[in-house]
Image (cartoon, coloured by chain):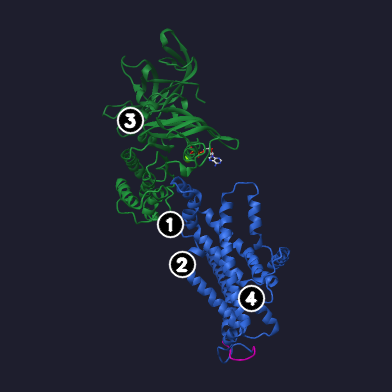
Chain colours: A blue, B green
């Protein structure tokens, strides 16, 4: 009896140990590259040498700021991500609302089609968009990029909004109607505010996806309009130096700032965890 | 003129008929209960009145106006949902103001009416709170206030007490009754609870499987049900099956397994019938007086239920019947003893058809 319980306890302990080491390994794998990049970005050496560096400086940050190529890329990326996210948020929210009310037969198929950019490789999407744009006679880089990036950010907004709409009881909308609100007003004053965490979460994911994208952008940039990730990629081929590490840190800081800002605006809890009004 | 009139309303969902040829009227100031078991079409009927479902057949009139093409926001109905549906992102005051803003009530008037209505539902001083900070009973009253404050032609309440615990339910039943009469508001209350319907309504529309069984006052529904379903759904009953035949002069006799029973059959056709005797009309008899029909029985057990004692007895044919005796300190026959139960012809309700 007691022998059994001891071996059982031992098995439990072993399992726990294995479980904890797995998690530790996982965290190490995701955090170590970040730490390495941050440390290397302050490396004073002019070449990529053994880790850790002995001396530190801000030279790679200066090099980044001095390089108009990267600066242009950053500006383009920011404008692109902002515009594409705005368009995708409006379109994705409207699509999610329309789909949540639709009762026709092809509803599920239409939803799958609208979400498909999530599973189609970005290179395929980028190539497709390039052909599509040239057919339409659109050769302006920014216009093409916005079209491509709306395509990849839209599904995020639609999906998270659709998910939060599912949690909103139909009786809220109906109560608004019976209190004399026209449908658009009921949507704007009741449904949308209740779905706002989903919409915001989708917009954040969409923004980050756009900012981070290489696959689609690679096909749609032109000589004058290119995004930061594309610029990094090109520079990496041409002359690999630690400016890229400095850039990575800028990326990380920008993301953290975005998250802090969102936390202020809506409560981080609400965006990644349970909804504000969820039960 | 009736505030609300339903004419031959039918609603189908696919092959299933949820509401089947329903007609009734609600007069000004009247509180009507839509009563029936779960799934009988009460909510669907209410949703058609509110404009969220469209009848396949029939017409609905509110205040004399045909609702055929009238959207929910153009109907002046006040709706209280089963889950209250208070907007969680708005304060109590904002919830109550919502309907008035949509109907163009001036700003100063809105804030005056918010205070007034919260006073009337006995929740002064909670205007700034969120719905999530209120108890179930408070939410319920805010939902009532939100609907009432727009002065609707008719109030529609769907199972207003079903989300509350038993004790609160009783208390709020009385409060709803008071609030509705304060506003002198024409109302329909949907419920599956017969006691709730009896306690709240001036009239009851009893529904079963999408159809109306009977429309009557609570008293009349209990006293003279017209169908087996109505007699069964409301109150307790003892059942005796038999065959009705008439002698001269309108008096009838029902031949049962227990012998002949003299009845006053009213308009019911000769043939298979079921007799319904309410427990309080079935009495222990000794001596000759009082009863038109006597039945031999053996007492099985007693249920003390406060003011009354319920006595369960078995008849000769094996049927278990219940009778009520006032709890006045009299000695009652012990279980196992033979008794005679009796009832008057007038206390025996004759219903068409045999019980399944
Ligand atoms: N939107 C709907 N689609 C399909 N069937 C429905 C719908 N609404 C109600 N029903 C069906 O109609 C019948 C009546 O429902 P309901 O009016 O909700 O009953 P009650 O409120 O009396 O419990 C039920 O059988 C229910 O399943
Ligand atoms: Mg219902």
In the rendered image, residue B295, in percent from the top left (x then y), is placed at 39, 18
Q: Is mark 1 within 8 Å of ligand 2?
A: no
**Residue under label 4:** A229
CA gap between label 2 and label 4 equals 28 Å
| Disc on res. A203 | none
Q: Which residue is mark 3?
A: B309
Magenta region: A42-48
Q: Is residue A28 above or below residue B229?
A: below
Tag 3, which chain? B
**Mark 2: secondary structure:** helix
Which badge, 3 or 1, comes first in the chain's sequence?
A: 1
Front-lying residue, A127 or A212: A127
**In the image, which is nearer the foreground, mark 2 or mark 3?**
2
Measure how far apart labels 4 and 1 are at the Cα level.
40 Å
Label 4 Cα crowd, 10 Å radius (few <14 / some 14-19 / many 20+):
many
Q: Which element carries disc 3, helix, strand or loop?
A: strand
Q: Which residue is mark 2?
A: A265
Mark 3 to mark 4: distance in Å?
Answer: 86 Å
């Amino acid at each position: 009896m007691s022998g059994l319980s001891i071996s059982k306890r031992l098995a439990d302990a072993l399992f726990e140990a294995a479980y904890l080491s797995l998690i530790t390994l996982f965290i190490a794998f995701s955090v170590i590259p970040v730490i390495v990049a941050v440390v290397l970005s302050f490396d004073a050496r002019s070449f990529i040498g053994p880790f850790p560096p002995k001396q530190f400086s801000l030279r790679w940050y200066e090099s980044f700021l001095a390089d108009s190529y990267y600066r242009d890329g950053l500006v383009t990326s920011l404008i692109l991500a902002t515009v594409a996210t705005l368009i995708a948020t409006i379109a994705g929210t409207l699509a999610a609302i329309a789909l949540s009310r639709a009762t026709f037969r092809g509803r599920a198929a239409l939803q799958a089609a609208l979400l498909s950019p999530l599973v189609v490789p970005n290179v395929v999407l980028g190539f497709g968009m390039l052909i599509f744009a040239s057919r339409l006679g659109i050769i302006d880089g920014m216009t093409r990029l916005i079209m491509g990036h709306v395509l990849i950010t839209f599904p995020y907004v639609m999906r998270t909004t659709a998910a939060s709409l599912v949690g909103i009881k139909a009786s809220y909308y109906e109560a608004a109607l019976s209190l004399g609100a026209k449908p658009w007003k009921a949507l704007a004053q009741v449904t949308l505010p209740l779905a706002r965490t989903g919409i915001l979460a989708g917009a954040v994911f969409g923004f980050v996806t756009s900012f981070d994208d290489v696959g689609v952008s690679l096909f749609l940039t032109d000589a004058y309009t290119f995004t930061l990730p594309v610029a990094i990629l090109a520079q990496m081929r041409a002359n690999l130096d630690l400016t890229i590490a400095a850039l990575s840190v800028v990326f990380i800081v920008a993301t953290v700032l975005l998250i802090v800002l969102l936390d202020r605006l809506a409560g981080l809890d609400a965006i990644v965890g349970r909804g504000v009004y969820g039960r | 003129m009736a505030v609300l009139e339903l004419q031959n309303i039918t609603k189908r969902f696919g092959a299933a008929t949820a509401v089947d040829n329903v007609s009734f009227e609600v007069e000004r100031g009247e509180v009507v209960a839509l009563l029936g078991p779960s799934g009988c079409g009460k909510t669907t009927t209410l949703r058609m009145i509110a404009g969220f479902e469209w009848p396949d057949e029939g017409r609905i009139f509110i205040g004399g106006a045909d609702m055929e093409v009238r959207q929910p926001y153009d109907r002046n109905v006040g709706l209280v949902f089963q889950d209250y549906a208070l907007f969680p992102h708005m304060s109590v005051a904002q919830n109550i103001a919502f309907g008035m803003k949509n109907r163009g009530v001036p700003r100063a008037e809105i804030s005056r009416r918010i205070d007034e209505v919260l006073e009337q539902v006995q929740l002064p001083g909670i205007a700034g709170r969120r719905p999530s900070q209120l108890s179930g009973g408070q939410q319920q009253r805010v939902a009532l206030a939100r609907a009432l404050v727009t002065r609707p032609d008719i109030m529609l309440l769907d199972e207003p007490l079903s989300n509350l615990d038993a004790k609160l339910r009783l208390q709020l039943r009385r409060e709803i009754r008071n609030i509705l009469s304060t506003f002198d508001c024409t109302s329909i209350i949907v419920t599956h609870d017969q006691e709730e319907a009896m306690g709240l309504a001036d009239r009851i529309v009893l529904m079963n499987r999408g159809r109306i069984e009977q429309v009557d006052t609570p008293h009349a529904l209990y006293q003279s049900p017209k169908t087996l379903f109505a007699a069964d759904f409301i109150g307790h009953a003892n059942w005796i099956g038999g065959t009705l035949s008439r002698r001269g002069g309108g008096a009838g006799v029902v031949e049962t397994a227990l012998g002949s029973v003299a009845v006053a059959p009213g308009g019911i056709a000769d043939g298979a019938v079921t007799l319904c005797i309410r427990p309080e009309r079935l009495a222990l008899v000794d001596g000759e007086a009082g009863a038109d029909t006597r039945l031999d029985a053996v007492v099985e057990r007693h249920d003390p239920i406060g003011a009354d004692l319920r006595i369960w007895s078995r008849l000769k044919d094996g049927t278990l019947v219940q009778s009520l005796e006032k709890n006045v300190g009299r000695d009652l026959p012990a279980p196992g003893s033979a008794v005679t139960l009796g009832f008057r012809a007038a206390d025996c309700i004759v219903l068409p058809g045999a019980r399944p």
